[in-house]
């Protein structure tokens, strides 16, 4: 705990030093800092001390999104590129120029851009700018390299955040984005070309970083119909006072996600302001936007917003984890609040310690041995069934090296066991028979949301022995839970009171 606190203090100090001691001749470094913070929020972590690999194309796409509004004419008194704000003291940024060309060809959002022939040159410009400029200069402080965030490997494919850094970005996301935007704003204001466009008074911050109000109007009728013209929060009929609210406030996560909107009374929206909503609202939002109407929202809003329900769930989990860590107040309604507390939304759990509730299933980790490697318990007699419930026990425990590249893992929380069967052998990341699985024990007080995650489920057989099963969980509108196989040959099961979630699947271990 002390080590984590020291790293967090070091992180804040480093970000402050970076903005003071760094050489910022352009705004790219501010955009890069913002982009890295966004990616850390959108990708779950194995543990607080995990490293995080971020592929450069993901950062390049973030830069395109962040600069999109900046490529719009600021001044109505000028025409063409002369009406654009500059991002540096020299020639106009290449990224701004190509984005301006896209907008002149009636491309109105990032999704349209990705589907057009303009995306390839735009992406190439963003990647070239990223690799030749801010990526390897961001951590030069007072003319010296200080690679606190990630090593300077000059890789053309990815960066790897040092152990614990992604967790710091998640913990202090609000602060990092605020500092990056404030420094970005000051840089824009300091450029002589821009001063003639801005004038003595302007809405510069709203122009650069504000909400696209025109796009929000597209979401309003869809949400009103979806909610049967009732306010999401107070559940009373709406008349002519309908507003679209960011469920996770825009001030906390300044990206528009299509699944993050709800229709509300103006009074409810104004009363909620920038608070996170209470758990009862959160559960209803998950049921409405991420389960029942997830595909409908994607179909209707993907022309205007990034519609990724998994990303919306990850962002909401992050926001509420931060609120819990800070004992923040959650908005119930009409100026009433409750304290943020960990809350499970699944059936019975066994007692065990656990860390942050995150799951990563799109990568495998290696069991490569290293000197003095941490040992994790391995239970050869526990078979995590990929088929039907299978009996096992925790006798004859062995210890194997912790997976290489998975970060620091608590052996009181994480363990290894074998998969048995082929019910999860399907989808994007199949789990095969006899795969070695990295699993995390979970408890009701810190389990968080398990919707959409793969978990090991335990029940007792007639003789009292434990039986185990691996399935993806989905909550139905009627409150029941589906246990879904990734192999379509297996039918969906409905959970009953005899079942307990035992562990969360993290990754397949490559041996």
Image (cartoon, rainbow, N blue to C red):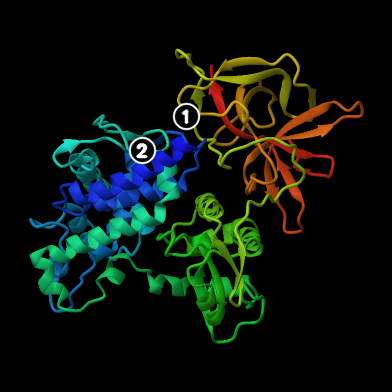
Q: Which label's residue is closer to the chain start, 1 or 2?
A: 2
Q: Is residue 302 left or right of residue 204?
A: right
Q: Residue at x 50, y 62 (%)?
A: 248
x then y, percent, for residue 51: 42, 33
Q: Position of residue 177 (x, y in %)?
A: 35, 56
Q: Would residue 58 be seen by someone viewing this image from the given angle?
A: no
Q: Residue at x 72, y 22 (%)?
A: 383
Q: Which residue is mark 2?
A: 55
- Residue displayed at 14% across by 69% down: 80
Above or below residue 486? Residue 477 is: below
Q: Is residue 294 above or below residue 76?
A: above
Q: Secondary structure at mark 2?
A: strand
- Of 106 and 184, nearer the camera is 184
- Looking at this view, name the residue that lies furthest to the right: 462
Coordinates of residue 494 in the picture (x, y in percent): 79, 45
> Comparing marks 1 and 2, which lies closer to the viewer?
1
Q: Residues within 10 Å of mark 2 (few under 14, many from 20)?
A: some
Compared to residue 117, the image places residue 197 above or below, namely below
What secondary structure is found at the residue carrying circle 1?
loop
> Which residue appears at 47% of the width and 65% of the height?
249
Where 398 sits versus 68, above or below? above
Work out how far the residue at label 1 is from the one at label 2, CA to CA, in angstroms: 18 Å
Decide which of 474, 201 is in the foreground and name it.
Answer: 201
**Which residue is the site of mark 1?**
407
- The answer to whether the residues at label 1 and label 2 have Cβ atoms under 8 Å apart is no
Percent of width and height locating residue 165: 39, 39
């Amino acid at each position: 705990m002390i080590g984590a606190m020291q790293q967090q203090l070091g992180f804040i100090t480093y970000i402050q030093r970076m903005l003071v001691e760094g050489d910022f001749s352009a705004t790219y470094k501010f955009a890069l800092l913002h982009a890295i913070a966004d990616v850390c929020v959108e990708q779950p972590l194995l543990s607080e001390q995990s490293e995080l690999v971020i592929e450069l194309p993901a950062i390049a796409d973030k830069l395109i999104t962040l600069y999109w509004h900046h490529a719009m004419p600021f001044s109505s008194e000028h025409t063409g590129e002369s009406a654009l704000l500059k991002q540096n003291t020299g020639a106009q940024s290449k990224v701004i120029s190509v984005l301006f060309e896209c907008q002149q060809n009636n491309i109105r959002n990032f999704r349209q851009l990705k589907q057009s022939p303009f995306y390839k040159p735009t992406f190439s410009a963003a990647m070239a700018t990223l690799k030749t400029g801010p990526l390897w200069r961001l951590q030069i402080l007072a003319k010296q390299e200080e690679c606190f965030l990630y090593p300077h490997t000059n890789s053309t494919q990815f960066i790897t955040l040092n152990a614990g850094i992604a967790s710091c970005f998640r913990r202090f996301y609000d602060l990092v984005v605020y500092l990056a935007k404030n420094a970005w704003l000051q840089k824009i204001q300091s450029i002589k070309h821009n001063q003639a466009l801005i004038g003595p008074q302007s809405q510069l911050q709203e122009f650069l970083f504000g909400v696209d109000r025109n796009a929000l109007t597209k979401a309003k009728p869809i949400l009103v119909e979806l909610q049967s013209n009732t306010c999401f929060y107070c559940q009373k009929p709406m008349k002519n006072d309908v507003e679209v609210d960011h469920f996770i406030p825009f001030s906390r996560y300044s990206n528009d996600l299509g699944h993050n909107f709800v229709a509300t009374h103006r009074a409810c929206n104004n009363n909620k302001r920038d608070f996170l909503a209470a758990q009862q609202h959160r559960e209803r939002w998950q049921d409405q936007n991420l389960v029942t109407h997830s595909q409908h929202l994607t179909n209707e809003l993907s022309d205007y917003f990034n519609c990724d329900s998994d990303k919306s769930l990850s962002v909401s989990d992050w926001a509420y984890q931060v609120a819990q860590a800070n004992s923040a107040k959650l908005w119930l309604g009409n100026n009433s609040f409750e304290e943020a507390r960990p809350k499970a939304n699944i059936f019975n759990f066994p007692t065990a310690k656990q860390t942050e509730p995150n799951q990563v299933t799109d990568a495998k980790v290696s069991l490569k041995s290293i000197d003095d490697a941490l040992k994790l318990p391995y239970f050869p007699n526990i078979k995590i069934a990929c088929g039907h419930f299978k009996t096992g026990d925790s006798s004859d425990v062995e210890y194997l090296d912790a997976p290489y590249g998975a970060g620091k893992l608590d052996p009181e929380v994480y363990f290894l066991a074998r998969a048995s069967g082929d019910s999860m052998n399907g989808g994007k990341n199949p789990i095969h028979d006899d795969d070695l699985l990295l699993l995390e024990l979970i408890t009701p007080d810190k389990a968080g949301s398990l919707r959409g995650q793969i978990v090991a489920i335990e029940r007792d057989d007639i003789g009292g022995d434990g039986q185990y099963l691996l399935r993806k969980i989905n909550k139905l509108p009627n409150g029941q839970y589906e246990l879904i196989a990734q192999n379509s040959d297996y039918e969906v099961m409905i959970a009953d009171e005899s079942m307990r979630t035992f562990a969360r699947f993290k990754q397949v271990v490559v041996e």
